[in-house]
Amino acid sequence: MSIVHEKRYGLRGCFIFKCKMFNVELLVNTEKDSQEMYVNRGAVCGTMSTGGGHAQLEEMMSSMNIPTMPAKTFRKRHDDVCDGWEATALNEMKLAVE
């Protein structure tokens, strides 16, 4: 089998392998669908936790020679993380009142 194509979704990837003998293609993702903290969300969450943004994530990833996610993907994951933090904060405030 050899790699014929790679698709990138931020830091997540999908590789397409092709068997030279049977001409069959196999799709391999770099993370499972059942994971709770996906790599893109985890990278954004970690960057936000340290007070950074897309530029800081991009700088860190480039220093390790790892392709980073586009700003649009970062913004989408940023909004997801903010929504989660807000929901958790509201729930904790409700518990504190009770």
Image (spheres, rainbow, N blue to C red):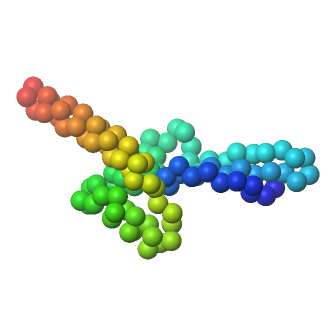
Name the residue located 46 percent from the left edge and 55 percent from the top edge. 69
Q: Position of residue 43 (x, y in %)?
A: 40, 55
Number of marks in the rendered image: 0
Q: Position of residue 77 (x, y in %)?
A: 38, 45
Name the residue located 45 percent from the left edge and 70 percent from the top edge. 62
Q: In which quarter of the view is residue 51 placed?
A: bottom left
Name the residue located 70 percent from the left edge and 53 percent from the top edge. 5
Q: Is residue 23 left or right of residue 30?
A: right
Q: Is residue 67 left or right of residue 93?
A: right
Q: Is residue 69 left or right of residue 26?
A: left
Q: Nearer the viewer, residue 82 or 54?
A: 54
Q: Is residue 33 left or right of residue 51?
A: right
Asked if one can make out residue 66 in the rendered structure from this viewpoint, the answer is yes
Decide: is 53 above or below 59: above
Asked if one can make out residue 42 in the rendered structure from this viewpoint, the answer is no
Q: Position of residue 81 (x, y in %)?
A: 32, 43
Q: Nearer the viewer, residue 68 or 44?
A: 68
Report the quarter where the C terminus lies: top left
Name the residue located 33 percent from the left edge and 51 percent from the top edge. 45
Report the quarter where the N terminus lies: bottom right
Q: Position of residue 36 (x, y in %)?
A: 44, 41
